[in-house]
Image (cartoon, rainbow, N blue to C red):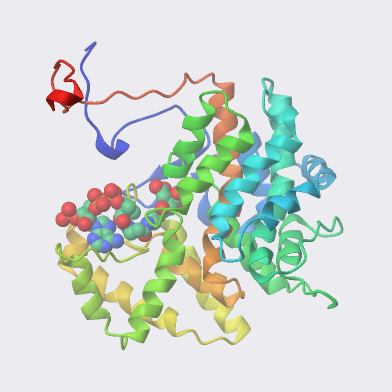
Amino acid sequence: QTGLITLDLGYKNTGATLSEITYLDGDQGELFYRGYPIEQIAEKSNFTEVMYLLLHGELPTEDQLDTFNGNIKKYNFVAEEMKKIIDAFPRSAHPMGVLSTLTSALTAFNPKSVNVQSKEEMDLAAELLIAKFAHLAAWTYRKTLGLPLNHGDNSLDYVENFYKMAFRLPNEEFVINPVVTAALNKLLILHADHEQNCSTSTVRMVGSAHTGLFASVSAGISALWGPLHGGANQAVIEMLELIEKDGGDVNKWVAKAKDKNDSFRLMGFGHRVYKNFDPRAKIIKKAADDLLAALGIEDKALDIAMQLEKVALEDEYFIERKLYPNVDFYSGIIYRALGIPTEMFTVMFALGRLPGWIAQWKEMRLKGDPIGRPRQVYQGAQKRDYIDISNR
Ligand code: SDX
């Protein structure tokens, strides 16, 4: 009916767009990238191939993948002036705030990336951003340690290149550990897209005003930073460390999470769409087990996470509300095992989600979606006359 406004707070049941990229079935706990089940993609693919799949809709042939890789390598550097921007931040600045700033600043050094109309121009902007974003993500980490900001190494693949830019130490030969890069590939694949989540909807909303790709992604980074969204992976580890420090009594903390008078929530649990296990959480949990075994690491946080999961999944409150572990519940265990510090966890989520944000932005622009402009149900003051300050 015209004129009728249906209030749907938090867009819990609003179909905001038509998309062909990612399919979720929340009840079945299924996730498909361009029709391919996430379990098969995580097992058989690699992050560069998944970036191509999300952006172009099909798995690439060898030639297509070589061309894609070559295009990305063409831009495997960042303007030196960008270092002056990152220098202005205190070392204590949260990497997500630095990353969002640097991503938007990229526009100033690539002005042609703003007013793009054709698919070719969008693909060019995408490859440029994919290449430079790996630098920005690596640099946000090195900034916190006061380490030199490196440029890329074209002899490496995308994930190896990021890992070396982030973790190489001055005057030391950097050794690529295949166990580490295999775990990173899997994690980045699992974070690559997730249909109309909060940060992707933000990228689409900002992009619907025909704002440039870099500034639209910068807005998405800010949305992802929130502890209810991508920031949850950092909040999970901080929660597990708190529980460990408090003596490891998971029943006490599950009770706190159920107490309506207590603002504490079980971070890494619950999901707006999944009312079953998040398929990514299952894959990450197994990958965490395998990686810790391969690296010979004992992590108390993993033991606490598994105890928490067991207690919560048997508890009426969580069962009734269909609250299960989500993608963020176990990912921090792996990042920690890879030597990635807690404040970098959400940057790793952003690096993974970048191709999804770009693919969704490109689809929105190519489909010609209108500028986003939802309505409201007004509950404020009725019409009234102005009162001079002398009469207030
Ligand atoms: C991500 O959307 C995506 O796809 C996101 C994501 C992606 O890939 O992009 O999957 C990534 O953001 C995963 C979610 C990470 N966030 C967290 O782990 C934070 C903890 N989880 C919650 O805050 C919550 O579950 C949300 C934000 C994820 C979902 O919130 P909803 O759908 O708005 O649900 P809600 O807040 O209305 O909760 C419904 C009920 C409430 O209880 P009642 O009012 O019905 O009594 O469930 C309770 C909530 O209090 N609840 C929780 C809980 N999550 C929900 N209670 C305790 N602990 C929790 N974690």
Q: Position of residue 32 (x, y in %)?
A: 49, 45
195 to 19, vertically: above or below: below
The N terminus sits in image quarter: top left
Asked whether the viewer can see residue 148, the reply is yes
Residue 130: image quadrant is top right
Q: Is residue 23 left or right of residue 307?
A: right
| Direction top: furthest residue | 2
For the image shown, how many numbered marks are present on the structure? 0
Residue drawn where x is 18% and y is 17% of the image: 386
Asked whether the viewer can see residue 57, the reply is no
Residue 160: image quadrant is bottom right
The C terminus sits in image quarter: top left
| Direction front: furthest residue | 390
Q: Nearer the viewer, residue 90 or 227?
A: 90
206 to 312, vertically: above or below: above
Residue drawn where x is 73% and y is 26% of the image: 120
Q: Is residue 311 left or right of residue 132?
A: left
Residue drawn where x is 68% and y is 60% of the image: 138
Q: Position of residue 11 (x, y in %)?
A: 31, 36
231 to 246, vertically: above or below: above
Q: Is residue 94 left or right of residue 382?
A: right
Q: Position of residue 82 (x, y in %)?
A: 74, 48
116 to 164, vertically: above or below: above
Q: Is residue 385 left or right of residue 57?
A: left
Q: Nearer the viewer, residue 27 or 55?
A: 55
Q: Quadrant of ligand 1?
A: bottom left
Q: Position of residue 212 (x, y in %)?
A: 62, 30
